[in-house]
Image (spheres, helix red, strand yellow):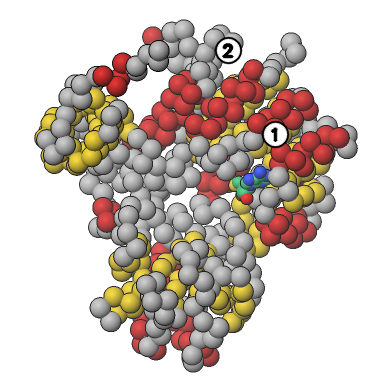
């Protein structure tokens, strides 16, 4: 007979629509407060750890529920007034009501919790905080998880804005989708966006209104302007504007270009992308240059990058440099090493490492990204890098069969982490060091466990805040091969 889970029979201590006092004990994946009422978990948006809040239960499941914050009864010392006036409607940021110091602490804690709870790995704690009985798999010391490296000015860091356009009450508006809906709310400024991007968007909206350019309507699939995309090379100041339209041509395009150039002198490139599909994907397949250059440029460290309308580029280049510098430190290169950069995107990490290595091999699944990577290698006159298009879990075993023996493997996988086949190949290749760059502490912890079982020791982890005021947590981790194996 199947033994019934005792939780099934446990009485739920709250009722839907009832009001309760909850103690907040943590932050959930969407920045919500994790609350407890008589041991029962309620997720409560807007509540912070350490607070006691009055909450109304709005949704109830067997194991947990969702509550609406009615009143904060005991206020966290880390609570601040969110500076953005549209913070609650927008949802693009989730942590503006937590002080920046608090955010950095929370991001480190996310890494520690995942390593301990999911990875069952030992984390080094100072003094009496040392965890008991956890992480038997590692040496005495445990993993050193450094404090999160934040930004000295954690605002206006984004170098790219992609703004949806709509017609609301006869007016062309552009801004953001109200949380959980397809309704577009007009936005004048976004505090995490570069000022120049904000400015260009305001001006393009006003020029479009002036010229009577119609806005796209999702429901009827009519109207022209769908998205305004703006990018800036933060180090060069160069800007690119991309107009995404539901139509092949833009009426009076010459006048439009002239007005844009007149009002926005920093713009170096104006592009047109046609997207006639019924989709919420921003770009269509065809892009042309309306005026100016096809590319703008930016630098990460001393590597120069060419950025096109469609190419992927990190949105916070200042912190990207911090993150990659850490990856470079952890790689411990002397100039003689063979390095593999798995999930290399446009080769940002590969190029960053190439100056200090004998050869870097990068692999990435998106063909256009590899084309960018190769172009950027040329642009920087880096000849000791080669790139392949394909799945890391297929290409790297093929490299192994070809006799490539890496000293260091760097991985920077998407949220779902590395494929198990890749982890096995990495273990078979036995590099001295593995540097794992992660945007998801949960899959990071899962993958580290496998690598530890296979003979590696996780020594340090460095969380880096790439996206201030959002819940995204990025970390770079060093693993070294256990010398006894
Ligand atoms: N390292 C890069 C980008 C990392 S993002 C940078 O710093 O810019 C993760 C990348 O992995 C994406 O570019 C995605 O296209 C790629 N990717 C996803 N699955 C993959 C797979 N199975 N094999 C290789 N690349 C993959």
Q: Can see residue 439?
A: yes
The furthest residue to the front: 1
Indicate the position of residue 137 as horizontal and vertical percent values.
58, 12
Q: Secondary structure at mark 1?
A: helix
Residue 339 against residue 210 in the figure, above or below: above
Task: Give the camera-side residue of 129 and 37.
Answer: 37
Image-quadrant location for residue 369: bottom right
Indicate the position of residue 307 as horizontal and vertical percent values.
62, 63
Task: Give the camera-side residue of 33 and 317.
Answer: 33
Q: Does the residue tagged 2 have its C-beta within 8 Å of any atom of ligand 1?
A: no
Q: Residues within 10 Å of mark 1 (few under 14, many from 20)?
A: some
Indicate the position of residue 470 as horizontal and vertical percent values.
39, 46
Disc nearest the viewer among 1 and 2: 1
Q: Does the residue tagged 1 have its C-beta within 8 Å of any atom of ligand 1?
A: yes
Q: Which mark is residue 137?
A: 2
Q: Which mark is residue 383?
A: none
Residue at image point 71% right, 45% down: 391
Quarter occupied by the N terminus: top left
Image-quadrant location for residue 167: bottom left
Q: Earlier in the sequence, mark 1 or mark 2?
A: 2
Task: Give the camera-side residue of 321 and 93.
Answer: 93
Left or right? Give the position of 241 relative to 384: left
Left or right? Give the position of 17 relative to 483: left
Left or right? Give the position of 207 relative to 313: left
Residue placed under numbered mark 1 in the picture? 422
């Amino acid at each position: 007979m199947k033994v019934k889970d005792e939780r099934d029979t446990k009485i739920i201590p709250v009722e839907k629509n009832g009001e309760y006092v909850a103690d907040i004990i943590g932050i959930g994946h969407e920045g919500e407060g994790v609350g407890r009422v008589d041991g029962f978990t309620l997720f409560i948006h807007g509540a912070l750890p350490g607070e006691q809040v009055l909450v109304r239960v709005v949704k109830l499941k067997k194991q947990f529920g969702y509550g609406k914050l009615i009143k904060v009864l005991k206020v966290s010392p880390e609570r601040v007034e969110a500076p953005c006036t549209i913070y609650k409607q927008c949802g693009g940021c989730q942590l503006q009501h937590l002080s920046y110091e608090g955010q950095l602490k929370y991001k480190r804690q996310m890494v520690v919790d995942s390593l301990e709870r999911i990875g069952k790995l030992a984390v080094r704690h100072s003094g009496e905080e040392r965890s008991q009985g956890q992480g038997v798999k590692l040496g005495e010391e445990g993993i050193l998880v450094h404090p999160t490296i934040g930004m000295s000015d954690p605002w206006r860091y984004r170098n790219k804005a992609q703004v949806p356009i709509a017609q609301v009450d006869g007016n062309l508006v552009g801004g953001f989708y109200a949380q959980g809906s397809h309704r577009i709310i007009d936005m004048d400024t976004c505090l995490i966006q570069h000022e120049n991007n904000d400015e260009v968007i305001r001006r393009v909206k006003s020029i479009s209104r002036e010229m009577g350019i119609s806005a796209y309507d999702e429901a009827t699939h009519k109207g022209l302007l769908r998205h305004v995309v703006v990018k800036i090379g933060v180090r060069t100041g160069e800007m690119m504007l991309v107009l995404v339209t539901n139509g092949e041509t833009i009426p009076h395009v010459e006048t439009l270009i002239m007005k844009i150039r007149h009002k926005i002198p920093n713009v170096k490139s104006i592009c047109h992308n046609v997207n006639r599909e019924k989709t919420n994907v921003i770009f269509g397949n065809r892009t042309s240059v309306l005026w100016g250059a096809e590319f703008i440029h930016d630098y990460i460290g001393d590597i120069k990058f060419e950025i096109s309308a469609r190419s992927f580029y990190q949105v916070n280049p200042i912190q990207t440099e911090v993150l990659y510098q850490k990856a470079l430190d952890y790689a411990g290169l002397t100039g003689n090493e063979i390095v593999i950069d798995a999930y290399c995107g446009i080769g940002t990490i590969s190029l960053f490492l190439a100056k200090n290595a004998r050869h870097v091999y990068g692999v990435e699944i998106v063909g256009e990204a590899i084309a960018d990577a190769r172009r950027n290698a040329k642009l920087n006159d880096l000849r000791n890098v080669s790139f392949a298009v394909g799945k890391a879990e297929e290409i790297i075993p093929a490299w192994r069969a070809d006799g490539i023996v890496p000293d260091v493997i760097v991985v920077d996988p998407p949220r779902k982490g590395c494929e198990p086949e890749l982890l096995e190949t990495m273990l078979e290749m036995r590099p001295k060091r593995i540097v794992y760059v992660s945007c998801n502490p949960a899959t990071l912890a899962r993958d580290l466990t496998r690598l530890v079982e296979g003979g590696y020791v996780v020594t340090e982890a460095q969380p880096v805040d790439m996206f201030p005021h959002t819940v995204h947590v990025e970390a770079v981790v060093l693993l070294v091969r256990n010398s006894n194996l």
